[in-house]
């Protein structure tokens, strides 16, 4: 497994000119082609960067919320590719699994649950678009100015690639640092991440309970004008908790009678 | 490698440009042979961040605002990972090391939690108002 990863990384991060030299047949001088000196790391970076930026702009430009969700999937997937190229394999894998596989599926479910015909594309006004374009361009110029103002950040990278391993990351999460300290950091001054790890675990539990509580189906007062929409909603929109505790028909009937009697 | 007569090395103030136009000499570098550096990742992160902020400000669909938040968090995450990567820095330059990756991991987890809660709130709003247009969420307006 480790050997396979090493091989992948060396393919990604080194120019493959020497590796392709023995591939060139006598009649086909590959070394003369411009492909020989190609830095595949840069090419893959350009590909993923263009995908990430292009689809991110697509999310802003699209009006249809389903298309926005699709573009966001592509943008975040390309971001995972950028993480792989930066040598953060575990973060890239987590990006794919949690973001693309979890969070975005959640978002797509939200899109599907709320995709009534007039709500699929809510268009902002033209003046809002202009304002957003101007503000976005200003913010981008500010960020680029800040990024380009540090000389140390402009230097091209070195070819030093650490062996890919998730072990230091996992050990840091349980509070033990086994990675090499950066040259500038004081020895012994580095801490593990046990406490943030535990806080995040409890936070996820609280979020799970809170989200289930917020999204549960409950007896509610709906404005009278929305009665048709509420009646047209399929029964399985209700959460299984409500189905288990009371018959669905009675629940919705109760809400309808409260709706007719209560009004606004 | 010199292709258009310009390389990455001549970036710092070869021509007196406005600071944000310092990106222009980057286009002169041959993207297929020159190694990439930290600045390339920072530019991608800035574009994603800006797209996310514009998305949050522009969209009237509550789910569109959520997608803008995801984009902003990803732009920040790209910067964390880029600063932690030794490959993108010149040799001997101190990096964030493992800390950047750990923080990026926490950001991903917190973004998932935030999306779950925000989606629950959005569905609640949809159930009560039959719309996801945030301009209609003005019940508390005096």
Image: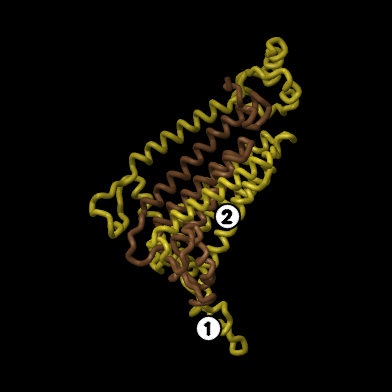
Chain colours: A yellow, B brown
Residue A116 location, quadrant: top right
- Residue A207: x and y in percent read 48, 32
Q: Which numbered disc flags the more N-terminal residue, 2 or 1?
A: 1
Residue located at (54% from left, 38% from top)? B115
Q: Residue furthest front?
A: B16
CB of mark 2 within 8 Å of CB of mark 1?
no
Residue A241 location, quadrant: top right
Image position of A141 (left or right of A130):
left
Q: Residue furthest left?
A: A187
Q: Which mark is residue A22?
A: 1
SS label for mark 2: helix
Q: Measure the C-alpha gap from mark 2 to mark 1.
A: 37 Å
Give neighbour class at mark 1: few <14, some 14-19, many 20+ (Cα, 10 Å).
few
Q: Is residue A10 above or below residue B82?
A: below
Give neighbour class at mark 2: few <14, some 14-19, many 20+ (Cα, 10 Å).
many
Q: Nearer the viewer, mark 2 or mark 1?
A: 2
Chain letter of disc 1 in the image:
A
Q: Which residue is mark 2?
A: A53
Residue located at (71% from left, 16% from top)? A256
- Residue B129: x and y in percent read 66, 25
Between residue A169 and residue B141, name the one nearer to us.
B141
């Amino acid at each position: 497994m480790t050997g396979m990863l090493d091989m992948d990384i060396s393919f990604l991060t080194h120019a493959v000119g020497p590796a392709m030299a023995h591939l060139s047949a006598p009649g086909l001088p590959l070394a003369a082609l411009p492909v020989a000196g190609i830095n595949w790391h840069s090419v893959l970076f350009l590909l993923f960067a263009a995908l990430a930026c292009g689809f991110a702009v697509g999310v802003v430009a699209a009006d249809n919320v389903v298309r926005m969700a699709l573009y966001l999937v592509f943008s975040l997937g390309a971001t995972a590719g950028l993480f792989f190229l930066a040598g953060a394999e575990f973060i890239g894998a987590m990006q794919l699994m949690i973001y693309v596989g979890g969070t975005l599926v959640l978002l797509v479910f939200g899109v599907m649950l709320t995709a009534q015909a007039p709500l699929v594309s809510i268009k902002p006004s033209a003046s809002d678009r202009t304002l957003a374009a101007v503000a976005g361009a200003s913010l981008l110029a500010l960020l680029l100015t800040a990024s380009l103002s540090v000389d140390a950040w402009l230097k091209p990278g070195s070819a030093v690639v650490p062996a890919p391993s998730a072990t230091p990351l996992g050990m840091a999460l349980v509070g033990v640092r086994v990675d090499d300290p950066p040259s500038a950091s004081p020895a012994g001054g580095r801490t593990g991440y046990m406490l943030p790890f535990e806080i995040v675990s409890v936070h996820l539990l609280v979020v799970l309970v809170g989200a289930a509580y917020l999204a549960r189906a409950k007896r509610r007062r709906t404005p009278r004008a929305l009665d048709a929409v509420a009646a047209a909603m399929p029964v399985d929109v209700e959460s299984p908790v409500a189905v288990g505790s009371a018959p669905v028909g009675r629940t919705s009937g109760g809400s309808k009678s409260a709706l007719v009697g209560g009004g606004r | 490698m010199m292709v258009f007569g310009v390389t990455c090395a001549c970036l710092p103030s070869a021509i007196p440009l406005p600071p944000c136009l310092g990106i222009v000499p980057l286009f002169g570098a041959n993207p297929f042979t020159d190694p990439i550096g930290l600045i390339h990742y920072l530019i991608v992160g800035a574009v994603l961040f800006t797209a996310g902020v514009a998305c949050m400000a522009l969209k009237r669909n509550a789910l569109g605002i959520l997608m803008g938040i995801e984009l902003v968090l990803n732009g920040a995450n790209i910067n964390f990972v880029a600063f932690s990567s030794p490959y993108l820095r010149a040799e001997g330059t101190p990096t964030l090391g493992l800390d950047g990756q750990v923080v990026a991991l926490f950001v991903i987890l917190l973004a998932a939690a935030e999306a779950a809660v925000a989606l629950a709130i959005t569905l609640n709003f949809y159930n009560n108002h039959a719309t996801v247009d945030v301009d209609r969420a003005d019940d508390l307006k005096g």
